[in-house]
Amino acid sequence: MIASRSSSKPRGGLHSGALLAGLGLAASFFYVRAKAAQAERDNPPAGRFVEVDGLRLHYLERGSGPVLVMLHGNGVYAKDFETCGLLQEAAAHYRVIAFDRPGFGYSERPRSTVWTPEKQAALLLRALAQLGVESAIVLGHSWGTMVALAMGLQQPDFVRGLVLLSGYYYPSMRLDVATSTQPAVPLLGDLLRYTIAPLVSRLLWPGMAKRMFAPLPVPGRFRAFPVWMALRPGQLRASAAETALMIPSALAMSRHYGELKVPAVILAGTRDRVVDTGHQSERLHERLPDSALELAPGVGHMSHYAHPDRVMAAIDAIAARVGEPLHLRSPEAEALARASESGV
């Protein structure tokens, strides 16, 4: 009887621990669901939807003129370009179309597809055709630069030029691949992203933001970004999947950069702590047949917040190269256009 009592204690402790863990997961589930629902109520779709191959894509559209497509990076969605003010500034002279890439914001991301940059590019090109767009300048930030490059490689007659901000172009060692991909793992990832992962991500968010903007401070505009929109379970899965795809995608795409037939302006901060500027942007500039490189001293990964004027100059430089009206050209754009033409 003594042996029986002593053996029952561990089992009782295990049962109690399992019960507490279950209650904790249940509480996390309901908390995450409430926060995600509140985020969507506070931030309803601000744009329009287009359906391509049965998949709904959400996009923001502002302004008129030559078409400028904007593709956001991993972890955020199209609102990032609105938060930094670049979308509004560009809309003064361009018809800006900023997509929520598949799985981000209010765009769908079917699990039956592996959403490589090439797959996303093909989808977005079909979406733009449905919107009646015949040609466009394409701007991408971070992960979005790979999608922009894929669009230029797939349809060089459609893509008039590229503006590439703080991009990841070549495979490299990445700690976040090992630490941030769990929400994309079937079953276990599903459990995590509906319970623990959003809570952990919310705790880590200030530190991640600081790293993205370092060495500059996180600007007040970004502090207004709706964090819980980015922490919804569906978007966490998309973000984790793109982290897992980053290295193999860069490896596959880097073999084709020399085939790019459209002009590109490459911008990057010299103090980027997310991607190595020398290994990424400077190396890409050396490989592309027709590109200009502009490095922003003392700037980190979020160059579109630090220097939106330089980004606009890059957009205008591409417009100048492809014969858009002269009134779009600033002195900075003229200088970049000449640099691009000379291959500097």
Image: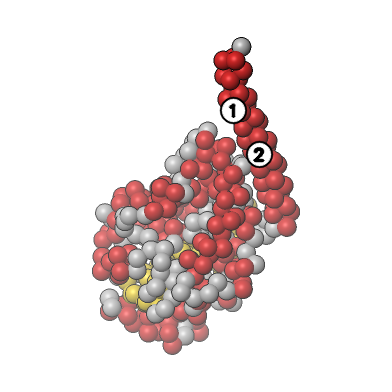
Query: Tag 2: residue type?
Result: Gly
Q: In the picture shown, does residue 26 fall above or below 117?
A: above
Cα distance between the residues tagged 1 and 2? 15 Å
Residue situated furthest front in the rendering: 2
Q: In the picture shown, does residue 200 fall above or below 314?
A: above
Q: Secondary structure at mark 1?
A: helix
Residue situated furthest top in the rendering: 1
Q: Residue at x 56, y 63 (%)?
A: 206
Q: Residues within 10 Å of mark 2 (few under 14, many from 20)?
A: few
Whether residue 158 is visible here, answered yes or no, is no
- Colour convention of the picture: secondary structure
Q: Secondary structure at mark 2?
A: helix
Q: Which residue is mark 2?
A: 24
Q: Nearer the viewer, residue 100 or 130?
A: 100
| Mark number, residue 14 | 1
Q: Position of residue 291 (x, y in %)?
A: 32, 71
Between disc 1 and disc 2, whose residue precedes? 1
Q: In the picture shown, does residue 165 fall above or below 170?
A: below
Q: Position of residue 39 (x, y in %)?
A: 69, 54
Q: In the picture shown, does residue 302 fall above or below 149?
A: below
Whether residue 153 is visible here, answered yes or no, is yes
Query: Tag 1: residue type?
Result: Leu
Q: Nearer the viewer, residue 287 or 183?
A: 183
| Front tag of 1 and 2 | 1
Q: How many marks?
A: 2
Please identify the quadrant where the N terminus is shown: top right
Please identify the quadrant where the C terminus is shown: bottom left
Q: Nearer the viewer, residue 276 or 290?
A: 276
Q: Residue at x 31, y 56 (%)?
A: 172
Q: Position of residue 190 (x, y in %)?
A: 56, 38
